[in-house]
């Protein structure tokens, strides 16, 4: 009878990995990484914010292969002098996060296409599927890779309303749909030669306003501060659109402003903010940005 095998320890052997990597997001939501030698079994992550919750993800690397992650939630002390938290490298594995779909929006329209955008507040999908019916009532489907968050559906009819349904797929399971109604724009009629001759050409075309970059300039547990640029022209007003717990939300901003603080948000949550500009009754945009409350 062979001798019994020795029991394995719950964590990896201290020298089983070539090195480790601890990944987390700082207070601004930016990803950070700390490399640790393979013979170590603990590390101190410095430069954190006081009284702040962090999710630490640990990966092990062995002969070029990545293992993990195992994860843990750590909370820094409220004392402003205590700016570090220790992360032991022997952590109980956390069950994988089930991905969620949120906020499908139409971000652009032409006579023959609709551009769609969506958010995945947590988790990761393997791929997506956009389903709709064409002008003849025939079902159509467009497959999108899991790392994408937007797609342009082409080959549509002008001035036609479409209901777009988005599904996410993860480990063979289907999530959704989330849906949105989009309308393609009407085709512009080409003026006749007589009409073109009768229409005097302006000496100088009016300057059309342009939306520049939208950025998150600050965050708190219940608000996000946004700032944007208008490199050309002037808008009459702006709107910031996002999806809150109660559904789609809209914040109106005067045309002379270039920043706003969106309040009433939930702590520790990711929001996708869309900015539109309005000029002479026409809507321009959106430009979008992802923000995370603290």
Image (cartoon, rainbow, N blue to C red):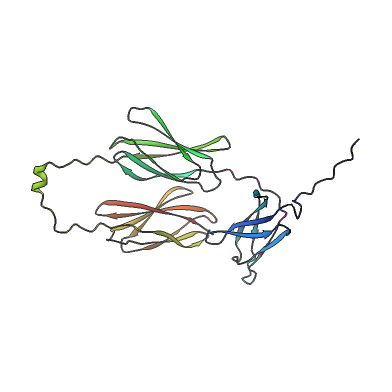
User: Who is closer to the viewer here, 262 or 184?
Assistant: 184
Q: Can you say whether 74 is above or below 194 in the image?
A: below
Image position, residue 234 (x, y; %): 27, 61
All told, the count of numbered labels is: 0
Q: What is the x, y in percent for residue 48?
A: 60, 65
Extreme residue toward the front, this view = 63
Asked if 5 appears above or below 242 in the picture, the reply is above
- Magenta: main secondary structure: loop
Residue at 13%, 58% (x, y): give it: 203
Q: Could you tell me which residue is drawn at 10 percent across and 52 percent down? A: 200
Magenta-colored stretch includes residue 242: no
242 or 44, which is in the foreground?
Answer: 44
Quarter of the image containing the C terminus?
Answer: bottom right
Q: Which residues are magenta?
A: 85-98
Q: Nearer the viewer, residue 266 or 160?
A: 160
Magenta segment includes 94? yes
């Amino acid at each position: 009878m062979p001798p019994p095998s020795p029991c394995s320890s719950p964590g990896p052997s201290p020298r089983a990995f070539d090195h480790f990597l601890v990944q987390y997001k700082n207070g601004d939501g930016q990803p950070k990484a700390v490399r640790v030698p393979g013979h170590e079994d603990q590390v101190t992550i410095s430069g954190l914010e006081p009284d702040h919750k962090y999710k630490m993800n640990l990966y092990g690397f062995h002969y070029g292969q990545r293992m993990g992650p195992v994860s843990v939630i750590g909370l820094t002390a409220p004392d402003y002098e205590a700016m570090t938290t220790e992360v032991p490298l022997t952590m109980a594995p956390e069950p994988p996060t089930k991905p969620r779909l949120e906020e499908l929006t139409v971000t652009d329209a032409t006579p023959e296409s609709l551009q769609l955008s969506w958010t995945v507040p947590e988790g990761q999908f393997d791929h997506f599927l956009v389903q709709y019916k064409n002008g003849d009532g025939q079902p159509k489907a467009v497959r999108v890779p899991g790392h994408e968050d937007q797609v342009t559906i082409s080959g549509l009819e002008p001035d036609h309303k479409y209901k777009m349904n988005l599904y996410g797929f993860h480990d063979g399971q289907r999530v959704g749909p989330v849906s949105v109604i989009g309308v393609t724009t009407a085709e512009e009629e080409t003026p006749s030669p007589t009409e073109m001759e009768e229409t005097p050409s302006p000496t100088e075309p009016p300057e059309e306003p342009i939306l520049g970059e939208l950025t998150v300039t600050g965050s708190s547990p219940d608000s996000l501060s946004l700032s944007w640029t208008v490199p050309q022209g002037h808008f009459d007003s702006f709107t910031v659109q996002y999806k809150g717990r109660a559904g789609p939300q809209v914040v109106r901003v005067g045309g002379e402003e270039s920043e706003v603080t969106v309040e009433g948000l939930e702590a520790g949550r990711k929001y996708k903010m869309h900015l539109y500009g309005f000029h002479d009754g026409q809507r321009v945009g959106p430009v979008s940005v992802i923000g995370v409350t603290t």
